[in-house]
Image (cartoon, rainbow, N blue to C red):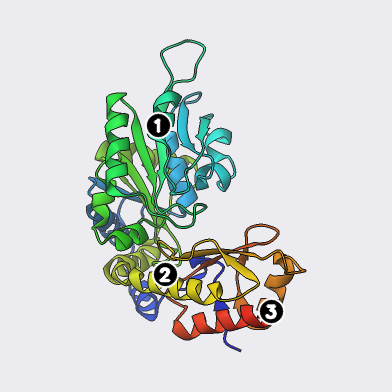
Amino acid sequence: MNIVDLRSDTVTQPTPEMRDAMAAAVVGDDVMEEDPTINRLQAMAAERMGKEAGLLVPSGTMGNLAAVLAHCGRGDEVILGNLAHTFLFEAGGIAALGGVHSHTLPNQPDGTLNLEHIHDAIRSEDVHFPVTRLILLENTHNRCGGVVLGLDYMARVGALAREYGLKIHLDGARLFNAAAALGVAAAELTKDVDTVTFCLSKGLCAPVGSVLCGSTEFIHQARRVRKQLGGGMRQAGVVAAAGIVALEKMTERLVEDHARAQKLARGLGELAGLVVETPVPATNMVFARLAESVPFGAKETVRRLAERGVKVGATGERRFRMVTHYWVDDAGIEQAVAAFGAVLGA
């Protein structure tokens, strides 16, 4: 049976070209900054982000954590969305390990934070208050449906941050999806932020790793934080080699995943038992929920779909997230729609 795995783009496996590059990688000790393949990847990543330097980290969570800890001291405050990945799904690391206070604002349906809300959240100089240091944004925004934060919005937040002397960190786990959706270079979306993390191991298919980018001075500090977090790696050029292929070969094809997400949404939208929340997906994510007429919930639906070779993620008692990626082709989309139809009796 052919398996169509739509649970996430984190399930992607390295391409044959990546496996060849990993096997042939020239390596060295990265803690000593002597791994030539890692150094090349970091330089490539920084250039793509329009920043001075980059730092390979094992995961996006570590990249975001290292960024916040490098920007903020204990008791400082970061402004971020109540649906931000860093707030919801990174185990409270910025508080547990950095003593950084989260000031959450409601994410708008388009993934943004209201500019007036940000302005009002910035603390005045008062001994009773934590010090506002950082604004954290997410692009694309996962829990808001894979939506894209546009160039104008990024510029306006950048201007606000500069007015008050704040820094901006961008959780750009799927930043290249945002760039592909807008038809712009990734650096256009990062020119108004101070630091950015993007993942190699999601839609770009590398097996491990993210890259944190910023100024040379910032990355020097982040490297120290990475070491404190246990992220100092040795001959990790075997990982970086796949990341280089990801940057060279995988970023330009993400529009294919977006087209398949739209095809999936159209197909699912024709089924009576399903309500598609993202009828025209912005990128590679489709969110849907069971109609009230369906007598069973998401857990049972997931089980029945798996019997038909389709894996989806349940994000609530009656809600699903499906993510397209390199390893899901047109036939896989058709198989997924047919499986939902069979399960729901549509």
Residue visible at 52% across and 34% down?
104
Label pair 2/1, CB-CB below 8 angstroms: no
Q: Quadrant of residue 251?
A: bottom left
**Tag 1: amino acid:** Leu
**Circle 2 sits in a helix, a strand or a loop, which is it?**
loop
Callout 2 environment at 10 Å: few (<14), some (14 to 19), or many (20+)?
A: many
Near-viewer residue (237 or 132): 132
User: Relative to residue 83, is residue 28 drawn left or right?
Assistant: left
In terms of sequence position, does the residue under pointer 2 or pointer 1 come before the other?
1
**Tag 2: amino acid:** Cys
Of circles 3 and 2, the one toward us is: 3
Residue picked out by circle 3: 343
Of circles 3 and 1, the one toward us is: 3
Residue 214 makes an appearance in the image: no
Residue picked out by circle 2: 205
- Alpha carbons under labels 2 and 1: distance apart: 30 Å
Near-viewer residue (153 or 86): 153
User: Relative to residue 160, is residue 330 drawn left or right?
Assistant: right
**Circle 1 sits in a helix, a strand or a loop, which is it?**
strand
